[in-house]
Amino acid sequence: MKKEFFLILGVATGLFVSGCKNNNKTSDHVSKTEQTSKLPDMKSAQVTPEKKQENPPVSLKVETYNPSGLFKDTPLMSVPIKDVLAKLEKVKGTVWYGLYLMGKKVGYSTNEWKIVKTPSGKTVVNYQKFHMEITNMAGKKVVDVSSEMHFEGEKTGHLLKHVNVQSTPNETRKFELSREKNGKYVFYTATKDKNGAFNMNKISEIPEPAGLSASELAIAHKISCGNACWKKDEKWKSIKFNYSTGGLSTEVAFVTGAKEEYSRGIKTKLFELKVMTDKPSMTMKTTVDSSGVMVSGNMGPIELRRMEKTLALKINSTIDIGIAALVQTKLEGFKSDKHNKIVLNITGNLSTEVFKYNPDRYKYKKIKDSSGVLTLTKDSVKGLKKVDIKSIKDKQILEATKPDHNIESDHAEIKKIAAKIAASSKDPIVQVEKTVNWVFKSITKTMSSDFDSAVMVAKELKGDCTEHSLLTTAVLRALGFPARMVGGIGYVEFGEGKTGFGYHAWVQVYLGRWIDIDPTWNQFPADAGHILLGSQTDLNWISLIGNIKIDKVLEIK
């Protein structure tokens, strides 16, 4: 429940929440304003509990497994429309939530269901709004997102329209899935122009998503009518549109426990649910009351807590999330251009699944529970070659060659950059290296920009590691190289004795094998001080924020 929120927050924060300053080259990589902004004291930046909380979040461990067959074998939920409409009558009105990141209040969210009368009949509409303010490495980020889902409200319950509008000080983007008169669903995107208008661009046709009978309201109905409507271990599946991927995502929810607690001063029964999605891979925990309305929810350090409007609107956190999330350690004597190998004792529930794409760089040996030895080896450039896309049969590699609504490798702006690089050298490996260098030199470094479109980055040429990685990925695809954005933590030195691994984004490119490159730090290949945690298709790594510890540096050579 509220999966949409967690997806939006992940995109809005750029996911890779820090670490975009360069190793020992801060003056070359950070704007003058941000250079002179004093970084908070490491001790004061640590997360401390707030004194007063309404509806403290239920402490739930976020698990990152994906049970085999869960998405395929669970039947699609189908609650009669009349039951869903009856439920709507009981939960009408706006519910307010406080938004917390690493225990600090950074924004708010609202959720509202209502019936709207139109010339063609009744429409059920779900409105969601999100507002977030965070400081990240002395750069402030403010994001506003609104979401609307319109369903036919009398007979079929079909999804009629799903609209998301995401606004930052630099960009406003609109994503819309519409049911056409012929019954087909079409995905459109647009960026607001200088006159404040949206010019919608058709991206693709999408298979039909689930309607009202498999919506959040349908689950609320199931919960509220108790054992008469659902059995122990029953799972509820829905197929939903995901604007961040531009496609459909399978979502499965199920109850994991129940208890009685005081909520708003009234003793009530609460149900704990797990919600899992496949695209992107993501696991959330939510707690709902006996009416099926969410009381709290979390995905790692990201939390929602239901509260009164006046409390929800108050934002007073001064935490610098980039500093607070830093995995503190010291790589004594490490030089990115000299050392090729780092061996660490590390604690954290690392998903080693992502290491398989570059097994020579990332090797992990589990010791006990969530700790193990991680060996990081800088990629060798020997034997690299460009592979003819037509000869590629691996679906995941092929996926990394295609344009999408965020990585618009087929756009004229991107092709123009690619053409310049192609003209500068016929050697494909040199072209990749030149792409890294061109992006590094061309983008003005700032932690205050939030672009999730490669074309917008190409036009504005400013941003942090997310923007560098977006543009690099798009240009490489335009040049015919499979490439994808990845994220994790990278080793950074801030001065004043502050060192560690900060959350960061970079790129993997396929040159006969995957190698890691870092355009933000002008590295081809990326240095050994990068620890891969996830990608755009796997958001489970977000639960690791604040939960990774470097226990010991075993070797640097």
Image: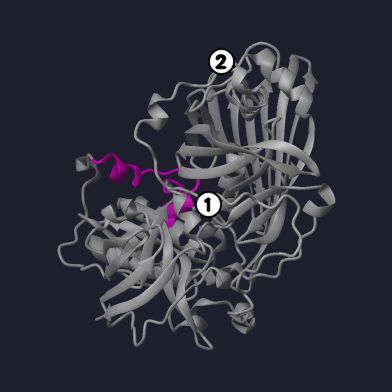
Amino acid type at circle 1 is Ser
Q: Residues within 10 Å of mark 1 (few under 14, many from 20)?
A: many
Which quarter of the picture shows residue 49? bottom right
State the separation of the CA atoms marked 1 and 2.
Answer: 30 Å
Magenta-colored span = 394-417
Left or right: where does residue 228 sit relative to residue 440?
Answer: right
Percent x, y for residue 145? 67, 47
Indicate the secondary structure of the residue bearing disc 2: loop
Amino acid type at circle 2 is Asn
Indicate the secondary structure of the residue bearing disc 1: loop
User: Is 353 contained in the magenta span?
Assistant: no
Q: Nearer the viewer, residue 353 or 466?
A: 353
Res. 262 visible in picture: yes
Residue assigned mark 1: 453
Q: Residue at x 30, y 52 (%)?
A: 481
Locate the C terminus by quadrant: bottom left
Q: Is residue 36 above or below residue 304?
A: below
Left or right: where does residue 526 sit relative to residue 216?
Answer: left
Left or right: where does residue 148 sit relative to residue 484?
Answer: right
Which quarter of the picture shows residue 365? bottom left
The numbered disc on residue 182 is 2
User: Is 408 contained in the magenta span?
Assistant: yes
The numbered disc on residue 293 is none
Looking at marks 1 and 2 on the same chain, the residue that comes earlier in the sequence is marked by 2
Q: Nearer the viewer, residue 255 or 340?
A: 255
Res. 199 visible in picture: no
Q: Nearer the viewer, residue 26 or 201?
A: 26
Percent x, y for residue 436? 37, 67
Q: Residue at x 74, y 44 (%)?
A: 262
